[in-house]
Image (cartoon, rainbow, N blue to C red):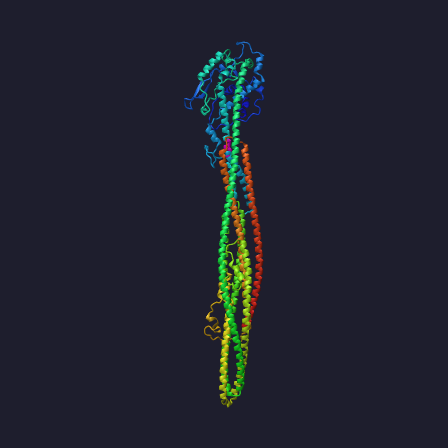
Amino acid sequence: MRRMFGNAFQSNTTSPTNNSHSTTNYQTDPLRSSQVDFSPSNSRSQSINSDPFGSLDDVFSPERLPFGSSQAGSFSNSPSHTRFPNTHEPASKTIRLDQRNRSDSATSFSDSSRGPARSPSTKHVLLGPDLKSKMMLELLSGQALVEASSFQILSFNRVQQLKKCTHSDFPTPSLSNQDQMKLENRLTSISNNLVLEKKIHDATLTLAESDVNQNDSNLEHSNQRLEQLRDEKARIQSELSEISTKLLQHLSATLSLSLKKLEQNQPSDYSSSFGQSPTRSASNHRQADQHRSPSPSLTDASRCTILSSDRFDGPHLFANNRHGLDHHQASHPSPRSASNLTLDTGQLLQYEKTIAQQTSDLEQLRAELANLRQQSVLAETNRTSNQANDLKRVERELKLENERVRHQTDQTHTQELDRLRREVDSLAADLERERSQLSGDKQAFSTRTSDAEARARAAEASQRQLEADVDRLRSELETAEEAKDSVRIELAALQAAVTRLADQKADSERQYQTLAEQLSSKESERREAIAQLDNFRSMVEKLEAENITLNKSVEDLKAQSDQQAEEKAKDDIDEPLSNHSAEWEKLLEKFSGVSTQVTLTNASFAQFLRGAPSQISMEGRMEWMNELIGHLENHLKIITTQHESTLETERQSHEQASQAQMDERTILSTQVAELETKLFELQSSHTPAATTTSSELETVTQQLAAAEKRIEEATTSANVVEKALRELFKSLPANAETRARLEHDADLGAFRLGYEAQPTKKSGLGGLFGLGKRAATPVEEGSEYTFDSFLERIKLLNESDKKLVDRLIKYEIEKDSYKNNATRAQKLAEECQAALKTYQSQVKELEERLEYADTQSATMLDRFNDLMESEEKAHALAKRSEAYTTQIANLNQQIENLKKELEEREDEIESMKKSEVKARHRFEDLEGEMSSLKLKLKQVERQ
């Protein structure tokens, strides 16, 4: 009521000299309805006066009353007209009714022609404090009715539509009747979203300042989002303000119409309360009843229009001056004539009853308003409980979603473990096959070794026999020196022996050339090994570049955690992961065939290879590779020991046979020189004594034939020894084609092919190994061949080749460790990215579900919402924002952990670089050894 009556006191300060009909209407007839306009563009009432009952003496001063010397003329005798809606005609049509005679409800004034003036006691009753308060209440009521005359009375459906507003991104001017979120709830939600967007914007701005090269698209998007939310908030606030204004205007107009109806139902009481005679009152009532139309109902109030220039038909304290205007003098009475107003005690009591009735009606309205507020509080309580239930349901759904994701992850890990087990089984089978093959090769090698030992013993026996034959031949030659003819025959035989020795020397030279070719092949293999090492270095550099790329990818992932750009980082990470997985499977396939070969020599290594996993985590791969390196080193030590023992045995046997042949060659060369000298002496002497020794010469010839036969047998045994050496060469890594292929292949397991038997070319060693016919090779003068130097060089080459293979295998393992580390880091980055996506999707889904929950809870709200509702929602959303802040802090902590892991990976890379430098130094030592071997080879060639 204070909201309706607030501006009445301010309006009473209008100048009393203004005699227009509008001023007279709202000052003299406050309970009379004026014209009502049902347009939605009416403004709200003015602010509430803090003291509407303040300066009563100023308000009711004679200068401010609407009657007296200056205001009396404003009450004309012409009747006023009031318009009410006709129930039998259209709503737009109005009926003008004659106003009741003002004299029916007026109180006569006392002047000089109508009797004595009022007594001072009567004047005191009229101007008492209680009467002033009642008069002020009447005046304020009239002012409120005048101001409420322009307000619009809405229908019940229209009011419900305003209280249950629709919610959409682009609402239309006409509000639909749907049970959805109220504008106040939407405003609260948008305010909280705006706070969250501001936090995200601040975080994006911080990231943009830290990273200068970052794209500003995310920052622009955040600014646009903030502007959209602010515009929407302003729009919803304006709509809320407009709806509140319409509802308040509707309430004021409804109360005004209720007061009018109450006054229309009590016309006789108001008329009698102003001292009229019964005859005049009855006649005036009959005249008013003839022109009065039925009072409009609340449902038809929206069609009622009343002229603003008409005066109110009800009784009023100031509507009693018409009688003085109809009779006697036409001049206006002075302000002092107001003291002649007569008012008895019964009339005042009747007026107080009317005021009490109106007060009781107002109390009923207040009670109804309190009930409505209580219902609103209950509805708000129910809505809050429903919202809490919705939040619990959303929490349960999130828990179920987390369990589902965890179950899917467990299934994926189980499948990966099964696949790794299957690959381990296949690798174990391959290792078993390799072990069996290796045992077969070992048996063949032992067989060849025993054959070589037997041939070496046979060669030693033949050498001893040859020495005995040479001694016997020497004695025979000494006896044949005395005869010239026998010497000539012996000289011819010795020349034949010299020819054979020349052929043997040519064979030795061819063998020397073959060894030189083998040395050159070793040199080419060394160059290929150097090239392979360079390739490994390039691969290591490539891995370092991939590691740098991975670091950049992780930094990009950190920068894009709030920008929702994970697809590019995922494309950068998935490709190296697939490549490393393929290389891991290829490495397992290469080692799968080794298990069967190493079964007999190294059972523990074969068992380890059979248990190799096909699918395992990055840490498991690193541990398995470290164990594999240890087993490979042990296996290489075992094979190296076996080869060295076999080579030492063969070398000793070959040294003995070679020493015997060299001694025999030296003795024969000395004998040839002596025989040539004797032949020259015999030719110079020309003695005829040669004819006498023909029989002796024939005997010597037979002996020489026998010696020649024994020499051929020794040569055959030497060929057998050479065949044994050929078998030994087969065990050496002398296959140049295999080494040439390794230059373009990153599989170090192919180095094992160099130790296996390879098909020999018939044009390579020729008659030295008994394959094909021996071609005549020109003898190089000044060249010297020794089996000791040959065996020493072969041993050095074999050792250097084994060391080179070991280094290459270590480089390959180091490369795999690089790849495994990079794969681990990439997997961690991928997991971080997946976790970030999961958190973002959960946050987004949670926001959507919360909006849906707010939408559903809006249907349970009642017509009245106070500020407590907004405060509770603000607290709930503040807690939600704190939860989001906690999640963001967790994500930042995960990013920090990833940074630490990347730093650890960088430290590991640095340690690997140091190991690479050490390996490079060792390789330089090998190059120095190879250079020394080259120098020795050049020295041998010069000899």
Give the magenta-colored segment's residue range.
236-242
- Magenta span includes 740: no
> How many marks on residues?
0
Q: Would residue 736 be seen by someone viewing this image from the given angle? A: yes
Q: Is residue 237 magenta?
A: yes
Q: Position of residue 403 (x, y in %)?
A: 51, 45
| Rendered-image quadrant of the C terminus | bottom right
Q: Is 129 located above or below residue 227 in the figure? A: above
Q: Is residue 217 visible?
A: no
**Residue placed most toward the observer, 385 or 732:** 385
Residue 386 location (% of width, % of height): 51, 36
Residue 7 percent coordinates (x, y): 54, 24
Q: Residue furthest left?
A: 89
Residue 166 or residue 930, whichever sits in front: 166
Image position of 409 with respect to 256: above or below: below
Q: Nearer the viewer, residue 632 or 193?
A: 632
Looking at the image, residue 916 lies above or below residue 251: below
Q: What type of secondary structure mainly makes up the magenta span? A: helix
Going 54% across and 25% down the picture, which residue do you hit?
Answer: 2
Which image quadrant is residue 52 in?
A: top right
In the rendered image, residue 813, in percent from the top left (x then y), is placed at 54, 59
